[in-house]
Amino acid sequence: MNALAILSLSIYMLAADLVPWTSDESALRLSRSTHRVDFFPLSNHFESQDNAIVCGLASSTIVLNALRLGGKAELPVDKSSIALTERDYLPEDFDPFFKKYTQTSVLTPSAKKRIEIFGKPVTINGKETADFGMQLRQLQQALESNGLHVKLNVVTDKADVKKIKAELIQNLKTKNDYVLVNYARKALGQTGGGHISPLGAYDQKSDSFLVMDVNPNKAPWVWVKASDLIAAMKTFDTIENRGYLLISDKQ
């Protein structure tokens, strides 16, 4: 990272204005928000990530269940939560497993990709690289493999900030579509690297978005200034800048 990039990142870290979810100010922002349609289904199906690597899978699981649980779609059954030896003690006619998406089943169509997420080297720009976690395009592919419609938006250095903000706000005031954001924690003054989580609401008065962080072990849900969040997405990942996904169901 060159000196200019370091200086720019330092400025973002100082400028980030994060309001924790549990504060009185947070409650006020949510109560007056007119762009919070997504918050309620997301919170109803919210779950934290199982480990430090699967923020993208956790976010995808929440969105898929918010879109499909209780509907007509045929949902997967993940039996990994109860070992085979433990099932021996259950009644033969009792099936304890729910039909729902999990952080394991959401990637079932491609077990190979799951291995890559946990560090199996892949070829990137002609070099074998252990690319832990998920890039935005990998997450897009995982969601599309589950039959969702996904619009990818990479936030480049020349991106139209007003257009991005308007697009995020529009999504948050309409039903049955969701936003996942991929941003650099350090750009918000948090510890850690790249991260993925859903957006739950927008408060016009404070011009801030609610990031429903899927890793409460590291950081709480927070309200983030729109300009700070977009700046945190305008950061370089393994092969390109980060950004966001707009997600809806084809079914």
Image (cartoon, rainbow, N blue to C red):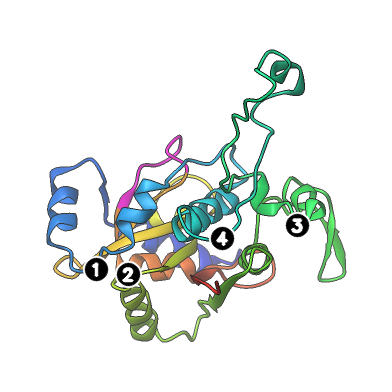
Label 4 close to label 2 by CB (< 8 Å): no
Q: Nearer the viewer, mark 4 or mark 2?
A: 4
Q: Which residue is mark 3?
A: 109
Q: Which residue is mark 4?
A: 73
Q: Nearer the viewer, residue 248 or 233?
A: 248
Tell me, for residue 35, which label it has, or none: 1
Q: Nearer the viewer, mark 3 or mark 4?
A: 4
Q: Which residue is mark 2?
A: 172
Q: Nearer the viewer, mark 3 or mark 1?
A: 3
Instruction: State the SS at label 4.
Output: loop
On the question of residue 73 being in view, the answer is yes
Distance in Å between CA atoms under marks 4 and 1: 27 Å
What type is the residue that disc 4 sits on?
A: Ala
Lower sequence index among marks 3 and 1: 1
What type is the residue that disc 2 sits on?
A: Leu
What type is the residue that disc 3 sits on?
A: Pro
Q: Quadrant of the N terminus?
A: bottom right
User: x, y percentage for residue 222?
Assistant: 31, 50
Label 3 close to label 2 by CB (< 8 Å): no
Residue at 64 percent of width and 30 percent of height = 81
Whether residue 217 is in magenta: the answer is yes
Lower sequence index among marks 4 and 2: 4
Q: Nearer the viewer, residue 111 or 4?
A: 111
User: x, y percentage for residue 237?
Assistant: 62, 64
User: x, y percentage for residue 127?
Assistant: 86, 64
Instruction: State the SS at label 3.
Output: loop
Identify the magenta region: 215-222
Q: Residues within 10 Å of mark 2 (few under 14, many from 20)?
A: many
Distance in Å between CA atoms under marks 4 and 2: 23 Å
